[in-house]
Image: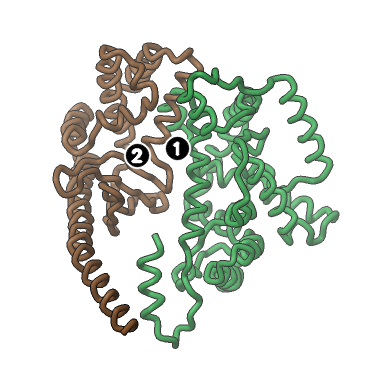
Chain colours: A brown, B green
Amino acid sequence: MKLMLDRRHCLIAGLFVAGTGLPLARAFAQAAEKASAFVQQTGDKLVGIVNGAQSAPDKRRALTQILEVAVDVDGIARFCLGRFWRVATPDQQKRYLAAFHEVLVTNISSKLGEYKGVKLTVQHARPQDDEAIVTTIVDRPNNPPTNVDWVIEQPTAAPRIIDVIAEGTSLRLTQRQDYASYLTRNNNNIDALIAAMKQQTAQSG
Amino acid sequence: MRAVVRRCRPVRFLSLAAFVSLAVGLAGCATPPPADDPDAVADFRQTNDPLEPTNRVFYKVNDTLDTYALKPVAKAYRFVLPERVRTGIHNVLDNLGGPVRLTNDTLEGKPRRAGDTAMRFLINSTAGVGGIFDVAKSAGFPNHDTDFALTLANWNVPEGPFLFLPVLGPSSPRDLTGFVADTAIDPFTWIARGQRVFTITSWTKTIVGALDERAGLLDVVDNIKKTALDPYATFRSLYRQNRAGKLETLRADNRATIPIWWPQAVSAQAASGGGK
């Protein structure tokens, strides 16, 4: 009798797990699939710009367009300011966001030349919490292949890139620690940070 | 920058230690933020760089050495030697690290990695002509990085605070310990020690190793210096993330050692599900 009860319990538990587990597994697989497609699509566009024959200003314009659609720049910017985001005034927040958009576009477009002949291959994707992580291999001439992970938010609804992890180093985390250290050494002055960011884009832009 | 001094003789190491303690005394320690700002305190703890002022002094020293000595020579090295030759040199140096890697793979309890390393050393030392050609890779024995500091990390030894060392660059107590242990483990530290031929070859190995590593990082370091507002903090962050990434890869590598004639289905599934 006891044995039967146990069996029945097992059966019920099994059904329960299957009932909730299957749709979940399907949603997971769907998220991974959509995220992969999104990264492939965005990657193709970026590679097209890098290897294209347009002039530098044209490339920069095209890049800005892609970034505004495919990357959650505001979200990344907030992450990078960390605990200082909450103490910033609305005006500072606005100016910081604008400066951050400029820094991002400038940094990427100044590196486009180095990536001439680049190839991007999507390997696989895995869901993590509400996000999906897509692993790719970036091949450029005369360089060893690099492992690059793309972190995608809302992979099924409105996919956008929120982080790029190159060989285990997260770009947004590195940027956040850079800004945090700069602020600590400049009396937590957010205006000084914004000025430094603007100066940086002016120098390399 | 880490590879500049691959071997430390006791005397050199002692004078380095004396120099470091003198510098800590002069430059001092980081001031923690006021206790009534919990967010700032949390950030300070997370940064875990209590010797920051001293570390920054050494960062400047190394940066100056790099700008005026190592980087120009590394640029010349890249300019003068064709890529094929540089790859060959890189492979030889990599192959010489085989015994140390094998010891660490074993201590980490990673049989498949140890097997890869052993096969790579055997194949590349012979068929690869003293390590010039990496033929083992195409034979199915991929290369991986490891060192005694990662072995310690795998044994759950904590990392400790950040250190920026003269000449050696970014480190931590765990990584410094690992560096000394790797030097001691390395048979090339001890073979024919004291003979002039050995001294010359080992210095050549040290210098070429530094050039090889620095030449490989020329663009990366330039980019970081150009885009970072605080390059020291950015190098600190990147160094730690890089080490943590290597540890993660090491821990996730649980490939089994199964002979080719044994049914492979289970291991293949485990590798694709467990590995990265």
Q: Position of residue B81 (x, y in %)?
A: 53, 47
Q: Callout 1: helix, strand or loop?
A: helix
Q: Residues within 10 Å of mark 1 (few under 14, many from 20)?
A: few
Q: Callout 2: helix, strand or loop?
A: helix
Q: Is residue B68 visible?
A: no
Quarter occupied by the N terminus of chain A: bottom left
Looking at this view, name the residue that lies furthest to the left. Answer: A157
Q: Which mark is residue B84?
A: none
Q: Nearer the viewer, residue A29 or A194?
A: A29
Q: Position of residue B244 (x, y in %)?
A: 50, 47
Q: Name the residue tied to disc 1.
A: B219
Q: Residues within 10 Å of mark 2 (few under 14, many from 20)?
A: few
Q: Name the residue tied to disc 2.
A: A114
Question: Vertical placement of A14 versus B158: above or below?
Answer: below
Q: Chain of mark 1?
A: B
Looking at this view, name the residue that lies furthest to the front. Answer: A1
Task: Please count the marks in the image.
Answer: 2
Q: Which residue shows up at 51% across the image and 25% down it?
A: B41
- Left or right, A47 with respect to B224, comes to left
The amino acid beneath tag 2 is Glu
Q: Position of residue A111 (x, y in %)?
A: 33, 34
- Left or right, B92 with respect to B253, comes to right
Q: Is residue B176 visible?
A: yes
Proximity of marks 2 and 1: CB atoms separated by less than 8 Å: yes
Q: Which residue shows up at 16% across the image and 35% down it?
A: A69
Question: Vertical placement of A44 versus B15: above or below?
Answer: below
Q: Position of residue B228 (x, y in %)?
A: 43, 27
- Left or right, B126 with respect to B219, comes to right
The amino acid beneath tag 1 is Asp
Q: Chain of mark 2?
A: A
* Quarter assignment of residue B159: top right
Rounded to the nearest whole Å, what is the CA distance between mark 2 and mark 1? 9 Å
